[in-house]
């Protein structure tokens, strides 16, 4: 079915032609148009499927109980999961929705009718220091909306926070225990406010997120404009760099890893009516919450569980892709990994619920495969682990992950790889960066793989792990265990390359299979080395904002003998900073 590649000149010519064709397509097509998304997606998916068929047809050894057969099939199983995830991603990305115009019309209607539903602002906090939580409280109190009440839901029952809330004019709520973690805290706030303000709209904020002053005026009208809309979710933006950006000194040249999800995937999922809540910076209707029994507490990811519970009852989440709040990203590598592992476990827990989108009733087919796509995002992470350790296993253990020479991979693998890179870069408008994206996912891949393995035996019953934020970051540690893992992988990959030439059993001429694994080892070494560098935390100081704002510079000569002096009008910059910080 797939002829053996032999002429490298012809193969390279074909690869170059395909790559140039993909670049021309990316130049001519517009990701704003659905037809262009579909066209480019079909081309990319076609090349990926050709590669997948070649992998299954021509690169597996005969089935047996040998280590080589089992290792090759373990590898291709997770590779197939990764390919399936990519293909479903392409289908999802064929659509796109921008609700800004709809939000603008809804905002104007509220202003015209001068009817503003009351809002209860819930700020969820657990042990955050004052320098973190005060940003959220003060910004919430400064919201430009005629009818709202701020409630600080304190799950560590701190007297100093109660006193602080009393001084600034916020309400302080506690409960006797921490049952059901964040969902339980929210439900306590829901019950406590029902007998006092009972506002029909609830804004949920994490303790480190500061809303912009127009957050409610931009979202409340949109929430009330459609009867089947239960939630309006906005993206998370951060005023600090995440630990990957920070430790690689790439904050100015590379976006955080969630920008692709927030700016590209969620608007696409919204077009399918499958956008989901992400835990903070969203508003929800109280009557819809009461109808479903409050915030769901069966899984640690109460946000995605809330969305799919709403979907089961016929209500959707609308995605408003506007920067209406500013928060604090995970500041250290351990916190970053803990956060991703928690998201992974929470997604698995919701999938296993009897009422969940996999086994439960009341969901459409589209809603089910969208959730399957999110599940595959985590299930394909072990593939990256296997990708990194495969070259040393080949060179020192004699077990190839798949039996293919570099000419065949050039013919069937490279076009699919380049198509995926170019397509994702095109549709995200440059928010993906090869090698660095793989290194970012590599940092969490081992922890997520361990989470997946543990979830096989005990998916429920483990404590909720919060993401620690704030505190002194001036003398950060070196994460020795994680550095040892990636350092070992990088060193063993480098050793593999050396061993290929100095081994006593090395052939006089490198075979096509050996050459393919040499290239593989080089790529694995680069990815592991970048991840290794990330393990060395750099100190953090105060996060500064870079502000671009029109200003005026006036010069005046007081006296010929006196040097000139200037007056810089920074009023516009101050106003911009105030809007950014709420």
Image (cartoon, rainbow, N blue to C red):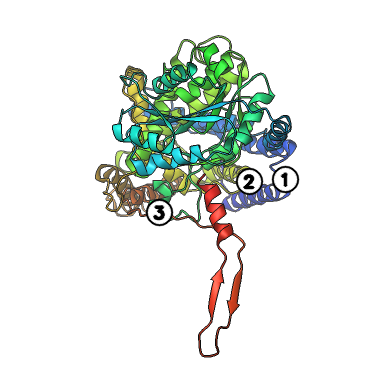
Q: CA distance from mark 2 to mark 1?
A: 9 Å
Asked if labels 1 and 2 touch by Cβ distance under 8 angstroms, the answer is yes
Q: Residue at x 54, y 57 (%)?
A: 547
As drawn, 407 above or below 558: above
CA distance separating discs 3 and 1? 33 Å
Q: Secondary structure at mark 2?
A: helix
Q: Is residue 92 visible?
A: no
* Among the 4 quarters of the image, the one containing residue 556: bottom right
* Mark linked to residue 248: 3
Dots 3, 1 in contact, CB < 8 A: no
Q: Secondary structure at mark 1?
A: loop
For label 1, the residue is 29
Question: Left or right: where does residue 5 sit relative to residue 228?
Answer: left
Residue 271 appears left or right of 167: right
Mark closer to the observer (3, 1): 3
In the rendered image, which residue does mark 2 sit on?
426
Instruction: Say whether disc 3 or disc 2 marks the residue closer to the N-terminus.
Output: 3
Residue 360, position in %: x, y? 52, 10
Q: Earlier in the sequence, mark 3 or mark 1?
A: 1
* Distance between mark 3 and mark 2 Cα atoms: 24 Å
On the image, which quarter does residue 183 sit in? Answer: top left
Among numbered discs 2 and 1, the one appearing first in the sequence: 1
In this orientation, which residue lies closer to the viewer: 422 or 193?
193
- With respect to residue 310, does 270 lie above or below? below
């Amino acid at each position: 079915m797939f002829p053996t590649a032999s002429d490298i000149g012809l193969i390279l010519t074909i690869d170059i032609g395909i790559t140039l064709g993909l670049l021309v397509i990316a130049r001519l097509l517009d990701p704003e148009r659905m037809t262009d998304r579909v066209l480019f997606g079909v081309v990319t998916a076609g090349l990926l499927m050709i590669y997948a068929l070649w992998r299954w047809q021509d690169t597996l050894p005969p089935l047996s109980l040998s280590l080589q057969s089992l290792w090759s099939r373990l590898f291709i199983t997770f590779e197939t999961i990764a390919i399936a995830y990519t293909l479903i991603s392409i289908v999802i990305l064929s659509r796109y929705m921008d609700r800004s115009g709809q939000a603008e019309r809804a905002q104007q209607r509220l202003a015209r009718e001068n009817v503003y539903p009351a809002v209860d602002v819930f700020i969820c906090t657990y042990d955050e220091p004052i320098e973190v939580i005060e940003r959220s409280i003060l910004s919430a109190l400064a919201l430009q909306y005629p009818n709202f009440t701020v409630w600080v839901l304190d799950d560590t029952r701190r007297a100093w926070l109660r006193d602080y809330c009393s001084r600034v004019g916020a309400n302080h709520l506690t409960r006797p225990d921490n049952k059901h973690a964040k969902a339980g805290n929210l439900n306590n706030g829901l019950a406590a406010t029902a007998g006092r303000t009972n506002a029909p709209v609830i804004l949920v904020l994490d303790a480190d997120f500061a809303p912009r002053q127009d957050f409610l005026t931009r979202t409340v009208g949109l929430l009330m404009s459609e009867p089947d809309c239960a939630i309006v979710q906005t993206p998370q933006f951060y005023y600090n760099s995440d630990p990957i950006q920070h430790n690689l000194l790439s904050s100015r040249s590379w976006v955080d890893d969630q920008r692709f999800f927030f700016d590209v995937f969620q608007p696409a999922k919204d077009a399918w009516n499958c956008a989901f809540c992400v835990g903070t910076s969203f508003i929800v209707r109280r009557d819809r919450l009461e109808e479903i029994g409050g915030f769901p507490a069966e899984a640690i990811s109460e946000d995605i569980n809330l969305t799919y519970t709403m979907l089961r009852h016929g209500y959707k989440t609308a995605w408003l892709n506007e920067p209406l709040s500013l928060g604090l990203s995970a500041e250290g590598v351990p916190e970053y990994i803990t956060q991703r592992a928690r998201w992974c476990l929470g997604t698995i827990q919701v999938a296993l619920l009897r009422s969940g989108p996999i086994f439960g009733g009341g969901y459409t087919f589209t809603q089910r495969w969208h959730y399957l796509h999110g599940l595959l995002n985590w299930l394909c992470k072990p593939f990256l682990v296997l990708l990194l350790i495969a070259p040393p296993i080949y060179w020192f253990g004699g077990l190839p992950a798949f039996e293919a020479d570099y000419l065949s991979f050039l013919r069937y693998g490279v076009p699919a790889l380049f198509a995926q890179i170019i397509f994702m870069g095109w549709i995200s408008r440059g928010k993906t960066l090869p090698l660095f994206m793989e290194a970012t996912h590599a940092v969490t891949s081992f922890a997520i793989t361990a989470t997946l393995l543990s979830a096989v035996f005990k998916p429920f019953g483990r404590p909720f792990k919060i993401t620690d934020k704030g505190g002194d970051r001036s003398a950060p540690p070196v994460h020795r265990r994680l550095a040892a893992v990636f350092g070992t992988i990088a060193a063993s990959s480098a050793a593999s390359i050396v061993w290929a030439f100095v081994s006593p059993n090395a052939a006089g001429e490198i075979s096509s299979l050996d050459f393919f694994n040499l290239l593989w080892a080089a790529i694995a070494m680069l990815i592991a080395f970048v991840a290794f560098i990330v393990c060395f935390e750099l100190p953090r100081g105060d996060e500064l904002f870079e502000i671009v704002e029109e200003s005026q510079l006036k010069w005046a000569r007081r006296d010929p003998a006196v040097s000139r002096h200037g007056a810089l009008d920074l009023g516009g910059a101050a106003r911009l900073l105030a809007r950014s910080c709420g």
